[in-house]
Amino acid sequence: MTFYTVSHTVCVAYYMPNGTTGSSDVLENLKLELRRGCLIVAVLAQLRDEQYGYTLRKALADDGLAIDEGTLYPLLRRLETQGLLVSQWREEDKRNKRFYRLSPDGELILKQLLEEWESINQSLGRILQEA
């Protein structure tokens, strides 16, 4: 598995007290939950190389993971607060832009997340073959 590979793996349990399943609301909520975890891995992987917000959004969209600004920028701030990213304001093309990249802790966490991702993928592969 390369760092750029983000498999679509469903690993979510959902409980409905009234026993209903299959509704489009349930599916949409599950897809949203799954996507949130994938976006964190994708953002960390993309930021192995320094980028600013717009280029990061574009790179994610080009790889099939479009993300709204209202989701991306709070995520970047949270990851930076957690010590996984570092940022720096710089002027480029006569505009100030905030550039982000992985911190050393972010590199370690990304490596560990990708190992966990691979383990989950292998387990699900076995489970799905049995089904």
Image (cartoon, rainbow, N blue to C red):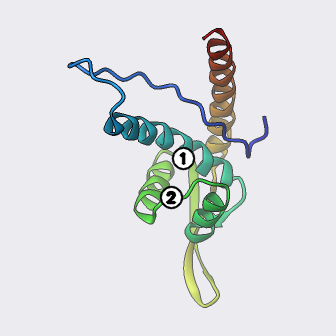
Q: Residue furthest left?
A: 18
Choose top left, top right, bottom left or bottom right for residue 110. top right
Residue 119: % across, % down? 67, 21
* For residue 38, side relative to residue 129 (left or right): left
* For residue 14, side relative to residue 17 (left or right): right
Residue at 33% over, 24% down: 21
Secondary structure under the numbered disc 1 in the rendered image: helix
Residue at 54% over, 47% down: 39
* For residue 101, side relative to residue 24 (left or right): right
Circle 2/circle 1 CB separation < 8 Å: yes
Q: Residue furthest bottom?
A: 94
> For the C terminus, which image quadrant?
top right
Q: Nearer the viewer, residue 40 or 100?
A: 40
Label 1 environment density (alpha carbons within 10 Å; few <14, some 14–19, many ≥20): some
Choose top left, top right, bottom left or bottom right for residue 90. bottom right
What amino acid is labelled 1 in the image?
Leu
Residue 123: % across, % down? 65, 16
Q: Nearer the viewer, residue 100 or 70?
A: 70
Label 2 environment density (alpha carbons within 10 Å; few <14, some 14–19, many ≥20): some
Position of residue 41 relative to residue 63, above or below, is: above
Q: Which disc, if any, is residue 49?
A: none
Separation of residues labelled 2 and 1 (CA atoms): 8 Å
Position of residue 131 relative to residue 88, above or below, is: above
What amino acid is labelled 2 in the image?
Ile
Task: Please tell me which of labels 2 and 1 falls first in the chain.
Answer: 1
Secondary structure under the numbered disc 2 in the rendered image: loop
Mark 1 lies on residue? 39
Residue at 69% over, 19% down: 122
Position of residue 1 relative to residue 11, above or below, is: below
Residue at 63% over, 49% down: 103
Mark 2 lies on residue? 67
